[in-house]
Image: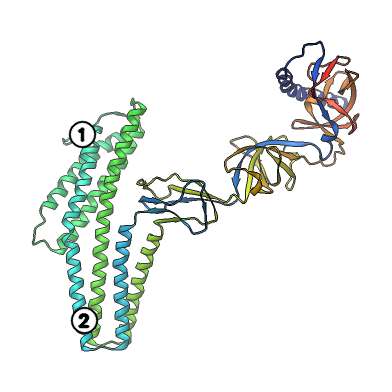
Amino acid sequence: MFKKHKILMSLLLVAVVAVAAVGSRLAVQNSGGSSDSAKRVNLIAVKDYGKSGSFVFGDGSVESLEQAELRSQISAQVSKINVSVGDKVSKDQALVNFQNADFLAQLGQVQAGLDAQESRLAEMRKGVRAEDLNITKTELDKANQGLGNIYSNTPNLLSDAYSKSEDAVRKQLDQFFTNDEELNPQLTFLVSDAQTKIDVETGRLGASAELNKWRVELSAVTSTSTQSDFDKLITNSKAHVAFIKSFLDRTSDAIRYETGLSQTAVDGFRLTLGVAKGEANGAATSISAQEQAISAQKLVIQGIKNQLQLKEAGYTSDQIASQEALVQQSLESVNALRAQVAKTVIRSPIDGVVAAIPARVGELSSPGQLVVSVVNKDWLKVKSFVSASDVSLVEEGADAVIGDNIAGKVNRVAPSIDPGTKKVQVDVIVSDPKTSNLVVGQNVAVKIAAKQIAGSGASFLLPLQAVKISSDGAFVYLVENGMLSERPVQLGAVNGEFVEVKSGISADMSIVSPVYELKTGEKVSVNQ
């Protein structure tokens, strides 16, 4: 039984070496021929393949140990980019700005409300004077006038929102449908999903109905329309835009399921739909901003009314506590808007270098969209991958060489095979990034010092292509007096592209590698 096992192991080793020989044959063929009868061979020093002299090879890419991919947290247009790729930046430095005029306007209004509430609380704590009552009444008149001014702008704002929404549906999407304004609008291209086709065509009919209803509502506005009428009109307008936005989103699905269109046509449809969505989003944003402005001003008015009421009636401890609650409520609104304003500026969380800026001035950025990337080039690593059969020779802390001569050290060996590369990830820390001249994203080769095989007692780990196996045993070739001579060796376990040699060679030898198609006694010439 033991004899059969040895035969099987020998056959397996022969097969492994044969596979390695295919690569070595290509290397020999690519090295060029010679004008005389002597074959040209390469020598390797056995001492380089001792317990600490063999290597595992891999390929990988340079990454930063400290890097940040900064993404938008809001939907806003990019207004300014303050840096360029390659610029050094400091922590908290402003990199990209979004348009924030609407947020700042809202913040100003809510801040004014907070100031008024705080002022009122201070007055309540001091007591009431006659002149204070008159001042508060004047403030209330001004606040009511301010609210009236906001409401007076509502018809024009909603008309503009209507125009944008109508353009999105009836102009931008005109090429998407036939019978647009009839009872049976039809898509101009085929859609593989029947339900999507039904939803989009029904949605187009509904969009026209929403626009028609909206137009009637706007035309009903007169000089006698009340603030309550405007509140209802704003609510209805929000609903109309919401329906249109939902319809445009469903239309995106129709493009995804289209059949028969060229890529150029598909790209054209997507571009047009993007313009339509931008108009609908703009309409929704303006309506929402108007609604928030009205709410903020009403809050200011209510605060002043409360102050006036308290002044006229005198202040109790409960009233003062209530006013304190109003101050806290206003402060929370201010802080919420300040947080929104802060999101309109993308700042670097680290000291580093700008690696990429996908954003462009004028583009509409969506929440989660990548805006700018920053990396710290002072801390670099190489995410490399080695053959699964070689990973047993790699251990954390092992020395490594990146590229030709850049020092590194193994930081981590993945516990499993990467499903994409079918190899094992090995992270190598760059010892001196500042002098390495490595660039994040650069592809590099990695050479890792292989560890000794545990418990094997092996003296050397030779490349498979340096060992020849025949029915008479295994041996290596030496060059003596211009001719090949063989030296029998005892082999151990195969590890990846290396084989353990237990005896038969010494560190002072130089042997031939590769040994493909070589024979003992052949005349050879050594490549220098």
Quadrant location of the C terminus? top right
Q: Amino acid at mark 2?
A: Ile
Q: Nearer the viewer, mark 1 or mark 2?
A: 2
Q: Is residue 404 visible?
A: yes
Task: Give how far across and how far down residue 130 sits, in percent.
Answer: 20, 88
Report crowding for label 1: few under 14, some 14 to 19, many 20 or more residues within 10 A (C-alpha).
some
Q: Of label 1 and label 2, which has the lower sequence position?
A: 2
Q: Please count the marks in the image.
A: 2
Report crowding for label 2: few under 14, some 14 to 19, many 20 or more residues within 10 A (C-alpha).
few
- Looking at the image, is 2 positioned above or below residue 436? above
Tell me the element at label 1: loop
Residue in view at x 90 percent, y 32 percent: 506
Task: Give how far across and how far down residue 181 sits, in percent.
Answer: 16, 36
In the foreground, 86 or 248: 86
Direction from residue 504 to residue 216 in the image, left or right? left
Q: Would you identify the image quadrant in which residue 28 lies?
A: top right
The residue identified by callout 1 is 185
Task: Give how far across and how far down residue 189 sits, in percent.
Answer: 28, 28
Direction from residue 141 to residue 90 in the image, left or right? right
The residue identified by callout 2 is 135
Q: Amino acid at mark 1?
A: Pro
For residue 430, the mark is none
Direction from residue 403 to residue 453 in the image, left or right? right
Residue in view at x 35 percent, y 26 percent: 262
